[in-house]
Image (cartoon, grey):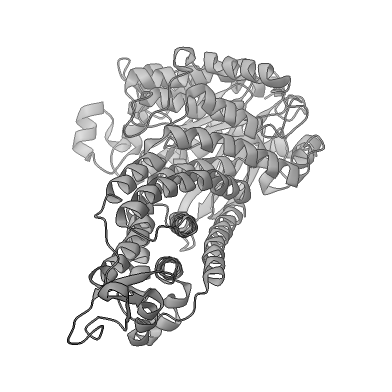
Amino acid sequence: MSEHDLDLEFGQSTPIADGSSCSLCFAHISARTSSDRTILSDISGCVPRGNMLAVLGPSGSGKTSLLDILANRSTISVDGRIWLDGTTPRDDKQIRNRVRYVQQEDALIGALTVRETLLFAARLGRTSASSPTDGGKRGLYQYVDGVISRLGLSEQANTKIGTPIQRGLSGGQKRRVSVGEKLVANIGGSDDNSCVVLVLDEITSGLDAVAAYEVVSRVKEFAEATGMIVVASIHQPSTATFTLFDSVLLMSQGKQVYFGPVNQVTGYFAKQGLIIPSNYNPAEFLLEITNTDFITTQERSSHLHLAKEFIGDGDQIDQLCRAWNVSEEAILLEAVLCKTASEEHLDRNLRYDMSRLGGFSGITITFRNTMILIQRAIIKGYRDILAYGVRVIMYRKWSRCSHLSANETTIQSFFNAIFFGSAFMSFMTVAYIPAFLEDLATYKKESHENLYGPAAFLLANVIVGLPFLFLITVLFAVVEYWMTGLRSSATAFFRFVMWLFLDLIAAESLVVLVSAIAPIFVAALAITAFANGLWMAVGGFLVQPNVLNKFWYYTFYWIDYQRYVFEGMIFNEMELRSYSCPWTSQGGCSGCMYAATEVENGVCKISGKTVLEARGYGRNWTGLWAGLVIAIAIAMRLLAYAWLRFKARRVGN
């Protein structure tokens, strides 16, 4: 068979191994788990420029595992070869510069519009001086608007994605936005006609037939217009959607059943004795003959009118796999892969993708991307009610408490008000968990594409969060402080604001750390609530330090930021204040709850210092306590950074 015949069979006009052509080829991909369970076994295929490959198979067939391997996201043991532009990547990160992965769940920021989402994606991916998005702000808008138009989202360009409490795009439109993010992110700054692969995991899941067709058709139009390669796993597509794909890879139980053009599926299986009825969806037929989980032999035979030898259990899958291995199509594919391997060349573009940054250093890119993330976070912050708006409402409602007078009967009430005020502010930072998890999901998606790392993500998070936290603090304090009747002093008020602000910074740092380690809402909520409850219990207010269990005392007591905040606020309130107590003719001031001295007009006064000493509080270490709270907050942020860095390296390796 001639080289020209190979090209015609796979829909190519130029040889695969030609350096001017573009193809994604993978040969004999096998994968095993750490427990030595086979996930994939000898999977091969080749997709030329501008073509779409459908990865089809029943649940558990290994579709997502294959996509993860092609996108360099897999953490299991893998054997086999992958070529891009006829070249094996020299570094794991290099293939991630060319392969864009759209995950099954849409990780989008609901407060942004469609145009804003794609604009930020384009700006984050603009790491090269030769990026096609160059040309200033106008050129960037034109580039993004072109992608929006091709995806059929022009009418929704200024529509917000949508949040749980704000209606936005439909499911199909969100899926197209997710695809658009990958299309506009010019990660490598590639303007050298280099190959880009778009990997889509279950792109039509959760969509009706019309929406699924619309999504796939738009992606196909873009692939044909730009020469992008598309590899998509797809679950039970309609006939119209299935025929949009150029080729199909059929899998079952991690094995390969078929690979080839979609329009040759009927002919191939007819040669195997499996006749697809003319009025039957070919994709549904393929899924039914490869799915042995639910349909019995009798039901399959009656439904599809198949010969007995092609019906049934795992033996049928083995028979189909053996038939594929000896088929003319498999031999032809193997010849293409062998030709690619024999003519493999060193692709300088692929090898030096990571260094083609137009003179930008790593620090420069980190700073630039941090500024972009800050702009995006600011927009989300003032639009997303769940991020900070709910907390403002809760804090303002709670702050309306009774006014307390300065006498001995209210001393305990002052302690209670200060303790529960600071503890409540800290505890209710759990309301930030959903907003941070949304940001974290976006970070994971974008960091996989090498857009930015955990440093830029966490820096932007803390820089944008501080002004919002300060605003929340002031709104709470101006009501709580004066209505409670705390010490009437400007200095005391601003110190009160300082302690609440530090309290919120540390509490939100705890939310960031816990959510980064356990990125599941229920788990993060439970762990954060438990941690805050623990800080309240061991902080010295509910249980005095001298009677606290030694384990809690020598561990969590000293790293309890709520303790330092509470003690700082107590000293701020009581150290320079006195509390009245009634003088009696029989005992004078001896009947007071604390040691008191008599003053004019028969009124006894209890010094705040006396109260603090009686309750076991020693010296005022305001500076040290403030420093410790800041250090604890920084430590939690650094731990979150270390964890995200560790996870990124684990995926990268």
Q: Residue at x 67, y 25 (%)?
A: 1
Q: Is residue 296 left or right of residue 361?
A: left
Above or below: residue 63 compared with residue 191: below
Residue name at image x 72 percent, y 25 percent: 21
Judge whether residue 71 can be spotted in this image: no
- Seen at 62% across and 51% down, the residue is 455
- The x and y percentages for residue 188 are 70, 34
Place of residue 592 in the rendered image (x, y in percent of width and height, measured from the top left): 24, 81
Q: Nearer the viewer, residue 17 or 444?
A: 444
429 versus 267 height, above or below: below
Q: Residue 206, how many percent across, how many down?
A: 33, 30
Question: Is the residue 277 above or below the residue 123 in the image?
Answer: above
Image coordinates of residue 345 in percent, x first then y, are: 79, 37
Residue 539 makes an appearance in the image:
yes
Q: Quadrant of residue 321?
A: top left
Q: Report which quarter residue 508 is drawn in.
A: bottom left
